[in-house]
Image: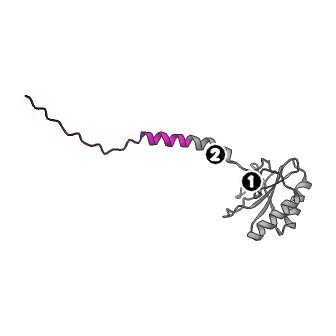
Amino acid sequence: MARRTRRARRMVAEINVVPYIDVMLVLLVIFMVTAPMLQQGVEVEPPQAAASPLEEQDEPPLLIIVDREGEFFVNQAENPEAPVSLATVTELVAAARSVDPEIPILVKGDRSSNYEAVMRAMVAAQEGGAAKVGLVTDSDPAAPDEEGQ
């Protein structure tokens, strides 16, 4: 009787990374598709101006948005995409300033909105206790840069 000897199988101590790569590629595609959809707020086209950008801050500013129909939106409201009244704008500014008295208050008006609506937003912010109210603009590509070139 011939005797067969069995060879002991060696254990392979390698990790198969192909399934992990597949999962990472799927997640990458999901994030690439959903990232542009995460833009919050109301779409407006601010006017262009040759102004220097503000310095980066830890806390985001309170942003009052005036769309082309003259409706007001506030980024720190319960629903930033729902229009609010001027009285609500004043209350939100006062509430934000009670939490952080140094919070910057900015008004972003659509370039085709009524100038009066933008001014009413600024007055409402001042009535809420804001000493300074800034205006948001797009940078003008035709304007010279900081070196004057």
Which residue is label 1 attached to? 144
User: Residue 80 versus residue 127: which sits nearer the camera?
Assistant: 80
Local SS, label 1: loop
Q: Is residue 137 left or right of residue 30?
A: right
Q: Is residue 32 above or below residue 148?
A: above
Query: Which sits earlier in the primary sequence, circle 2 or circle 1?
Result: 2
Type of amino acid at the residue the image marks with label 2: Ala
Query: Mark 2 highlights which residue?
Result: 35
Q: Confirm whether the magenta stretch covers residue 6.
A: yes
User: Which callout, 2 or 1, points to the residue nearer the camera?
Assistant: 2
Where is 9 relative to 63, above or below?
Answer: above
Q: Which residues are magenta?
A: 1-28
Instruction: Judge by depth and name the residue closer to the eye, 48 or 95.
Output: 95
Q: Nearer the viewer, residue 124 or 113?
A: 124
Q: Residue furthest front?
A: 1
Q: Residue at x 77, y 70 (%)?
A: 98
Q: Amino acid at mark 1?
A: Pro
Asked if marks 2 and 1 touch (Cβ < 8 Å), the reply is no
Is residue 38 magenta-colored?
no
The residue sitting at 10% across, 32% down in the picture is: 3
Q: Position of residue 18 (x, y in %)?
A: 42, 39
- SS at mark 2? helix
Specify the quadrant that holds the N terminus: top left
- Image coords of residue 116 (percent x, y): 92, 55
Can you say whether 58 is above or below 13 in the image? below
Instruction: Please identify the quarter of the rendering in which residue 121 is found.
Output: bottom right
- Name the quarter where the C terminus is drawn: bottom right
